[in-house]
Image (tube, rainbow, N blue to C red):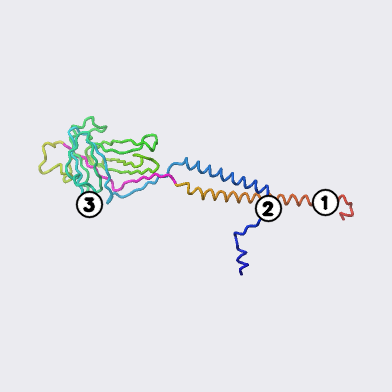
């Protein structure tokens, strides 16, 4: 029984005398393996980083910071009314003073915290006088702009520029994109981008949306002022950029290539051995036939 088990030993190697053919084929195998490693490494270094794009719900998440700048010469009135019940508690992370009416001067910038609320009345509100906005932005009647950190034109991942999107009166739906680039450094490693789409052009102040306006007793100083309402979408996008971990996989890839080349070399050695044996056998038969011819008809009979 134990002899039968020994017969299954796959690690027993037959001792074979070294030959010139084997040494030559082994040298070719090593050269091919090195060339393969160089080729794979060059291809890896030239390939672009891996980009993973995801989608997450905004409800119950956040808040997300957004820089807004007042572009009305008379200033802006900013408020951010939120409730924990309508935001699944995420508004608890927003400073309480943001809910109050805050005056923001012309060309002044503040950071507001954006949160999704199931109540469309809640959220970021900006009031301003449209008659004091002429020439301040590229959009006529816009009283503010929001800032995004975007990648520079030309594909340079280390370069970041600021994009200012003008916002006029009405309701705007915000799409948020957060990019984490682990192949970049500095400000390019973490970028926040905001994209705004107008969904309503109504400039009237929405009742209950801001403490800056009392519809029952209107402030005559705010006559003619309009409201911009900014509401984040129900989802946001995440982008993560990473360099593929290659060096650990290189060992397995090189080992597989070396094993494959060894098998090809073994086939070549078997083929060379078969051709050599066939040649020796043919020469042996030729010599026997030649000796019989020289011995005369009696030896051939």
- 92 horizontally vs 292: left or right: left
Mark 3 is surrounded, within 10 Å at the Cα level, by few (under 14), some (14 to 19) or many (20 or more) other residues, namely some
Residue 60: x %, y % from top left = 27, 51
Pick whichever of labels 2 and 3 is earlier in the sequence. 2
User: SS of the residue at dot 1?
Assistant: helix
Asked if the residues shown at circle 2 and circle 3 are in contact, with their CB atoms under 8 angstroms apart, the answer is no
Viewer-proximal residue among 207 and 40: 40
Tell me which corner region of the image, top left, top right, bottom left or bottom right, holds residue 219. Answer: top left
Which residue bears the numbered disc 2? 17
User: Which residue is located at x 89 percent, y 54 percent?
Assistant: 298
Image: magenta residue range: 225-244
* Magenta stretch: helix, strand or loop mostly: strand
Mark 2 lies on a secondary structure that is loop
Of badges 2 and 3, nearer the viewer stands 2
Farthest residue in the left direction? Answer: 217
Disc 1 or 2, which lies upstream in sequence?
A: 2
Label whose residue precedes the other's in the sequence (1 or 3): 3
Residue 259, image x, y percentages: 57, 51
Q: CA distance from mark 1 to mark 2?
A: 32 Å
Q: Which residue is disc 3 drawn over?
A: 86
Can you tell which mark lies on residue 19? none
Q: Residue at x 33, y 35 (%)?
A: 161
* Residue 289, numbered label: 1
Q: CA distance from mark 2 to mark 3?
A: 83 Å
Which of labels 1 and 2 is toward the front?
2
Report the residue that reaches farthest toward the bottom.
Answer: 1
Residue 29 forms part of the magenta stretch: no
**Dot 3: element:** helix
């Amino acid at each position: 029984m134990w002899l039968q088990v020994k017969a299954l030993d796959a690690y027993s190697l037959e001792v074979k005398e070294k030959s010139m053919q084997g040494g030559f084929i082994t040298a070719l195998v090593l050269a091919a393996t090195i060339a393969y490693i160089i080729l794979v490494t060059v291809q890896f270094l030239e390939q672009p980083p891996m980009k993973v794009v995801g989608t997450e719900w905004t409800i119950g998440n956040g808040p997300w910071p957004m820089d807004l700048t007042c572009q009305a010469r008379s200033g802006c009135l900013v408020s951010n009314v939120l409730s924990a019940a309508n935001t699944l508690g995420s508004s608890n992370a927003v400073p309480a003073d943001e809910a109050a009416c805050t005056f923001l001067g012309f060309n002044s910038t503040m950071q507001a915290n954006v949160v999704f609320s199931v109540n469309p009345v809640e959220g970021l509100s900006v009031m301003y006088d449209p008659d004091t906005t002429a020439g301040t932005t590229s959009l006529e009647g816009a009283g503010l702009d929001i800032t995004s950190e975007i990648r520079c034109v030309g594909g340079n991942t280390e370069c970041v520029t600021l994009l200012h999107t003008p916002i006029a009166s009405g309701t705007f739906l915000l799409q948020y994109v957060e990019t984490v680039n682990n192949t970049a450094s500095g400000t390019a490693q973490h970028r926040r981008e905001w994209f705004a789409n107008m969904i309503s052009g109504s400039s009237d102040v929405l009742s209950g949306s801001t403490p800056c306006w009392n519809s029952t007793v209107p402030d005559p100083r705010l006559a003619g002022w309009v409201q911009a309402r900014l509401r984040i979408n129900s989802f946001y996008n995440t982008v993560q950029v990473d360099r593929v971990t290659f060096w650990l996989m290189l060992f397995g890839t090189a080992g597989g290539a070396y094993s494959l080349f060894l098998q090809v070399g073994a086939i070549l050695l078997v083929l060379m051995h078969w051709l050599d044996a066939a040649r020796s056998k043919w020469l042996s038969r030729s010599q026997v036939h030649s000796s019989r011819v020289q011995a005369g008809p009696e030896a051939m009979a």
